[in-house]
Image (cartoon, grey):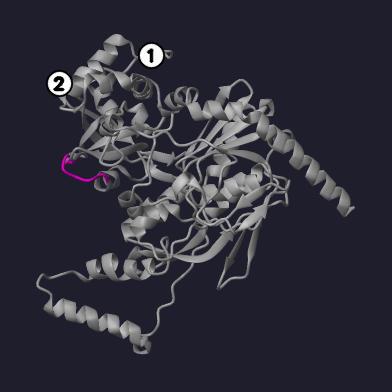
């Protein structure tokens, strides 16, 4: 089951780059630097203002802070909410994510309670084979104390050339001594795709982000392993997908469309209009035929943005998929990275993108602060602007100006105060994560695959919360028992097996996924109509 992730302004403003559909890493724009003697008067004014600050401010301030945190971001935010300045460290990390490959030990880490902990050792990675586990506190790397370091610093120590070795020491709750192991680094390819049979004949395909450049290949590989030719329907889960690379979203949408069908058009001030069309995928003929024949239900919510809206809009406009969920974020601006000196970069909005029907789905951002833009949403989950009315291939009305409106509403489950206390959206892992540390102690987690939390486990969890000073009443605990069981099962299965298996069990009981299964006949009806319309158009062209 998807953990709800509200679009918290503090998080989103700090992560605005994630909402930017980008060109691929090989197509980077370059900034032009004017000669010093040819400075525009406005630039001279900035230089003079900085000189005054440097000479007269009560507290000394570095030029890096003035320009990296003040001048440049302020200038970009005056343009639109998505143009952004990226520091050298963040830009390097962004490009690493796009490459979807790095050299290291193969695990996700996160800061938690002043320490850096293991969130996920990737299956069959060097970290996995060295028995590093979810919940481990990283205490030292090559003898260097890391207990007071941040996650970026620890990650840098863990990375290195494939074949090189790194010595890692971790602390485990319940273990009497730290565990130290020597790991041989490898070439790690990351994956943001989950695919499995959610029921016989129905594939669940989850894509968590479009930041990586291997999404198309990963989707093809995973669907091939499932034998896509046996599929009678597919659920494409783009909930909480904040976006990423345009080319990857075009490829994913195009995979389920006919070659030559429009995916999006891009219009900017500098470059002429560009049309992105579906291309025949590099797949065996039977797999291509299968991808064009089964119905699709797309799951979205208010956190589905940017590149995920490109996919959703294209499939909806061509009547190729039934869209279920909430109105999406409404981000129709395209950014390109402009590398700067010293490894920094500008993410500058260069164009608007339009869905195949001609919709601009960008939400209005005039006369709004960044806080209001990222946090405030239209009442009733409806588009802010409905004057931009277009039609799908089959003649259904669709609207621009406020995100992608789903064909069928399914509101994101609202969390109550008890759930928010136990499952914080910022600030580290949830209570279930920490309970699992104590439940398994220093032992290697083992559970039967069909494990469910029994009454004894539920009582132990309640006592754990009380011992950790969580505030709640018996009535609150009882009212949330189903939610507690669901989250406990996910966490414990994650520990005993891996994240993918935990996700599979979780999605198979997710109410919205079950609703998508029930909505598959509507998607099948759309597919039938779109096939007929396409055949008629092809016939008229002869």
Q: Which mark is residue 452?
A: 1
* x, y percent for residue 125: 40, 32
Magenta run includes residue 146: yes
1 sits to left or right of 267? left
Based on the displayed image, in which of its 4 quarters is residue 283 positioned? top right
Label 2: which residue?
A: 176
Describe the element under mark 1 as helix, strand or loop: loop
- Residue found farthest to the right: 542
Q: Which mark is residue 506?
A: none
**Residue 26 seen by the camera:** yes
Based on the displayed image, in which of its 4 quarters is residue 373 positioned? bottom left
488 sits to left or right of 293? left
Magenta run includes residue 211: no
* x, y percent for residue 15: 36, 52
Describe the element under mark 2 as helix, strand or loop: loop
Instruction: Measure how far apart labels 1 and 2 are at the Cα level.
Output: 29 Å
Pick whichever of labels 1 and 2 is earlier in the sequence. Answer: 2
Nearer to us in this view, 462 or 285: 462
Picture residue at 29% right of the left edge, 47% below the top? 156
Magenta segment, prevailing SS (helix, strand or loop):
loop
Based on the displayed image, in which of its 4 quarters is residue 133 positioned? top left
When the figure is inspected, residue 425 is found, relative to residue 489, above or below; the finding is: below
When the figure is inspected, residue 329 is found, relative to residue 40, above or below; the finding is: above
Q: Quadrant of the N terminus?
A: top left
The answer to whether the residue labelled 1 contacts the one labelled 2, judged by CB atoms less than 8 Å apart, is no
* Magenta range: 145-151
When the figure is inspected, residue 359 is found, relative to residue 342, above or below; the finding is: above
* x, y percent for residue 281: 67, 44
Picture residue at 50% right of the left edge, 23% below the top? 508
What is the crowding at mark 1: few (fewer than 14 residues within 10 Å), some, or many (at least 20)? some
């Amino acid at each position: 089951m998807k953990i709800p992730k509200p679009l918290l302004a503090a998080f989103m403003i700090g992560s605005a780059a994630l909402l930017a559909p980008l060109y691929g890493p090989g197509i980077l724009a370059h900034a032009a630097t004017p000669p010093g003697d040819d400075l525009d008067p406005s630039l001279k004014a900035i230089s003079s203002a900085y000189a005054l600050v440097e000479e007269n401010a009560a507290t000394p301030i570095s030029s890096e802070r003035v320009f990296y945190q003040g001048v440049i971001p302020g200038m970009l935010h005056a343009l639109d909410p998505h143009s952004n300045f990226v520091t050298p460290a963040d830009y390097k990390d962004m490009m690493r994510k796009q490459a979807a490959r790095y050299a290291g030990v193969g695990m996700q880490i996160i800061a938690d309670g002043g320490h850096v902990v293991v969130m996920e050792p990737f299956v069959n990675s060097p970290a996995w084979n060295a028995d590093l586990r979810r919940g481990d506190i990283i205490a030292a790397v090559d003898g260097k104390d890391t207990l007071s370091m941040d996650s970026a610093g620890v990650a840098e120590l863990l990375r290195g050339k494939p074949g090189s070795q790194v010595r890692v020491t971790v602390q485990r709750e319940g273990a009497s001594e730290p565990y130290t192991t020597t790991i041989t680094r490898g070439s790690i390819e990351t994956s943001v795709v989950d695919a499995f049979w959610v029921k016989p004949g129905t594939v669940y395909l989850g894509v968590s982000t479009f930041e990586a450049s291997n999404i198309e290949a990963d989707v093809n590989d995973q669907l091939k392993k499932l034998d896509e030719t046996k599929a009678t329907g597919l659920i494409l889960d783009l909930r909480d997908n904040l976006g990423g690379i345009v080319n990857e979203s075009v490829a994913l949408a195009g995979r389920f469309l006919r070659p030559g069908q429009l995916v999006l058009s891009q219009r900017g001030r500098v470059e002429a209009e560009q049309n992105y069309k579906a291309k025949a995928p590099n797949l065996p003929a039977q797999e291509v035929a299968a991808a064009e024949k089964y119905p699709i239900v797309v799951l979205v919510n208010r956190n589905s943005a940017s590149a995920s809206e490109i996919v959703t809009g294209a499939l909806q406009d061509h009547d190729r998929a039934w869209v279920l969920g909430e109105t999406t974020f409404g981000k129709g601006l395209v950014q390109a990275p402009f590398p700067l000196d010293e490894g920094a970069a500008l993410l500058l909005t260069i164009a608007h993108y339009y869905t195949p029907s001609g919709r601009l789905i960008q939400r209005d951002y005039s006369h709004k602060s960044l806080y209001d833009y990222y946090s405030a949403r239209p009442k009733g989950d409806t588009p802010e602007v409905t004057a931009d009315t277009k039609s799908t291939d089959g003649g259904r009305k669709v609207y621009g100006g406020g995100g992608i409106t789903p064909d069928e509403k399914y509101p994101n489950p609202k969390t109550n105060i008890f759930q928010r206390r136990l499952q914080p959206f910022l600030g580290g892992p949830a209570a279930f994560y920490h309970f699992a540390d104590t439940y398994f102690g220093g032992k290697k987690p083992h559970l039967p695959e069909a494990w469910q939390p029994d009454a004894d486990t539920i009582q132990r969890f309640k006592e754990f919360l009380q011992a950790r000073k969580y505030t709640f009443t018996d009535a609150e605990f009882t009212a949330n028992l189903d939610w507690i069981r669901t989250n406990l099962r996910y966490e414990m299965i994650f520990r005993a097996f891996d994240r993918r298996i935990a996700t599979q069990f979780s999605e198979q009981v997710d109410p919205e996924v079950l609703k998508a299964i029930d909505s598959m006949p509507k998607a099948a009806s759309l597919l039938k109509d779109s096939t007929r319309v396409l055949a008629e158009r092809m016939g008229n062209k002869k």
